[in-house]
Amino acid sequence: MSETYGRGREETEEERADRQWSELLQELRVAQTGVQILFGFMLAVVFQERFTDLVEADRNIYVVTVMLGAATAATLIGPVSYHRLLTGRRMKPQTVIWASRMTVLGLVLLFCTMCSTLLLILRVALHNQLALWLVGAMALWFLLCWFGFPLWAVAKGRSGPRVDDTDDGDDRA
């Protein structure tokens, strides 16, 4: 028996989970690539000669940034292992729910990682308070692009009502 879930699509729960999983994988590929490049860059910083010249505050920011980067990578790669461990157990809808939640958490951690990275780089480059203002402005921009604009669209009715907790979005924006 097929249901449309209020959007005109006739798909079973399993078909819907398969579609949502495919969409989520496409989103994760973009985020994972960026995280892996950023994390690799941050790991290399400690081996640069100038690293020993950093003041204690900048070293602390570096450690926090590396830990955030590691947590971000783990969270955004996590859905892959979750899916792999549950494959064949007829749990695709539940897998999509948890993978979607991990992805949102990964985006929040990525936001923190990006801000922390910017703070470290701008503190080293500028040596003044302008670094904090620039990071604050960029943090606001990230928040608007990643969370504010989508939530604004929902509030203004530009996207359909969210069907349930497993809905990770509709590609017909």
Image: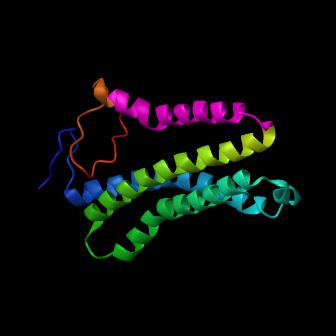
The image shows a total of numbered marks equal to 0
Image height check: is 46 above or below 121? below
Residue 40, image quadrant: bottom right
Q: Of helix, strand and loop, which mostly describes the magenta segment?
A: helix
Which of these two is toward me, 37 or 129? 129
Quadrant in the picture for the N terminus: bottom left
Q: Residue furthest top?
A: 156
* Residue 68 position in % (x across, y down): 57, 57
Q: Could you tell me if residue 173 is visible in this image?
A: no
Q: Which residue lies at the image location 44% right of the left edge and 71% below the top edge?
A: 81
Q: Residue furthest right?
A: 49
Residue 42, image quadrant: bottom right
Q: Is residue 4 left or right of residue 25?
A: left
Q: Could you tell me if residue 110 is visible in this image?
A: yes
Which of these two is toward me, 76 or 83? 76
Magenta segment includes 56: no
Which of these two is toward me, 83 or 155? 155
Quadrant in the picture for the C terminus: top left
Magenta segment boundaries in residue numbering = 126-153
Magenta segment includes 140: yes
Q: Is residue 103 left or right of residue 44?
A: left
* Residue 165 position in % (x across, y down): 24, 50
Q: Which residue lies at the image location 33% right of the left edge and 61% below the top edge?
A: 98
* Residue 65 position in % (x across, y down): 63, 55
Q: Which residue lies at the image location 73% right of the left edge and 45% below the top edge?
A: 121
Colouring mode (rainbow / by chain / secondary structure / one colour): rainbow
Q: Residue furthest left?
A: 1
Image height check: is 53 above or below 86? above
* Residue 128 position in % (x across, y down): 75, 34
Q: Is residue 133 left or right of residue 143?
A: right
Which of these two is toward me, 41 or 158? 41
Q: Which residue lies at the image location 66% right of the left edge and 48% below the top edge?
A: 117
